[in-house]
């Protein structure tokens, strides 16, 4: 008696999918099973997001969707229509690196660079999460807004992003420096004296009036 043949899976037709990535709309034809990672790399041509483990364990594929960091290898592209997606290509503005990108360079927070796009996207979202008051596992009191982004806080919040070169100490230092720079700028802006328009237009020398 001949063995029963396994049923042949029928191909699933592609469907139109629009993704808003880095402020640009990409109109793609995708099968429903295409992951966001493959859509970005193979269809949109954005090769900055890396495919590492393809199982959500290494963080190399991290992108930001509606302000939340996600592993793009674990989610389908069709699930993110209408969302605002940011990849590593969208972190700089008009050719100017973001403060975090600059501190990564200043602190040598990468070696081979393969994990760096995911590290940057994850750290960018991390800093925003902290500013919004999100607690972590190592926050002393999760009912209260964390007051300090310590190295332990950074290590815990970045634990989903692996660096096989072992540049963890420099990555933590880079994120801490970016956070401190943002805090210093915010303090300076808050401390700047207010000058009304009348005072600004008044000449310093009374004789010039």
Image (cartoon, helix red, strand yellow):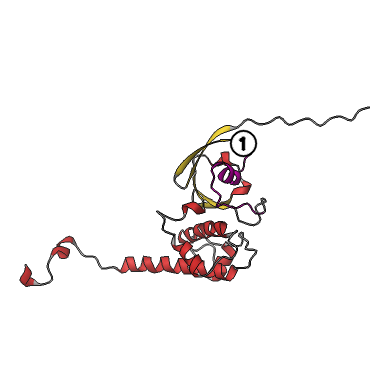
Q: Quadrant of residue 4?
A: top right
Circle 1 SS class = loop
Identify the residue shown where x is 51% and y is 68%: 174
Residue at 12% across, 66% down:
202
Percent across and percent down for residue 79 are 57, 40
Q: Nearer the viewer, residue 6 or 184?
A: 6
What is the span of residues highlighted in magenta in the rendered image? 34-52
Is residue 84 or residue 103 the one in the foreground? 103
Residue beneath label 1, please? 32
- Circle count: 1
Q: Position of residue 97 (x, y in %)?
A: 44, 59
- Residue drawn at 40 percent across, 53 percent down: 94
Residue 36 image position (x, y, % from top left): 58, 44
Confirm whether residue 138 shows in the render: no
Q: Is residue 151 above or below residue 93?
A: below
Q: Is residue 22 visible?
A: yes
Q: Position of residue 150 (x, y in %)?
A: 52, 70
Query: 174 or 51: which is nearer to us?
Result: 51
Which quarter of the picture shows residue 32? top right
């Amino acid at each position: 008696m001949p063995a029963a043949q396994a049923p042949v899976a029928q191909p699933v037709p592609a469907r139109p999918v629009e993704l808003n990535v880095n402020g640009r709309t990409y109109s793609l034809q995708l099968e429903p099973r295409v992951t966001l990672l493959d859509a970005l790399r193979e269809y949109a041509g954005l090769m900055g997001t890396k495919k590492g483990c393809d199982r959500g364990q290494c963080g190399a594929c991290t992108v930001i969707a509606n302000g939340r960091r996600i592993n793009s290898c674990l989610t389908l592209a069709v699930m993110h229509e209408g969302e605002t997606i940011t990849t590593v290509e969208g972190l700089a503005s008009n050719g100017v690196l973001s403060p975090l990108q600059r501190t990564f360079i200043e602190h040598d927070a990468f070696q081979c660079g393969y994990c760096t796009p995911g590290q940057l996207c994850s750290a960018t979202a991390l800093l925003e999460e902290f500013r919004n008051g999100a607690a972590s596992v190592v926050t002393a009191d999760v009912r209260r807004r964390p007051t300090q982004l310590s190295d332990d806080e950074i290590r815990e919040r970045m634990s989903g992003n692996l660096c096989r070169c072992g540049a963890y100490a420099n990555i933590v230092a880079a994120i801490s420096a970016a956070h401190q720079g943002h805090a210093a700028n915010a303090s300076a802006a808050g401390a700047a004296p207010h000058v009304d328009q009348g005072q600004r237009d008044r000449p310093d020398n009374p004789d010039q009036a």
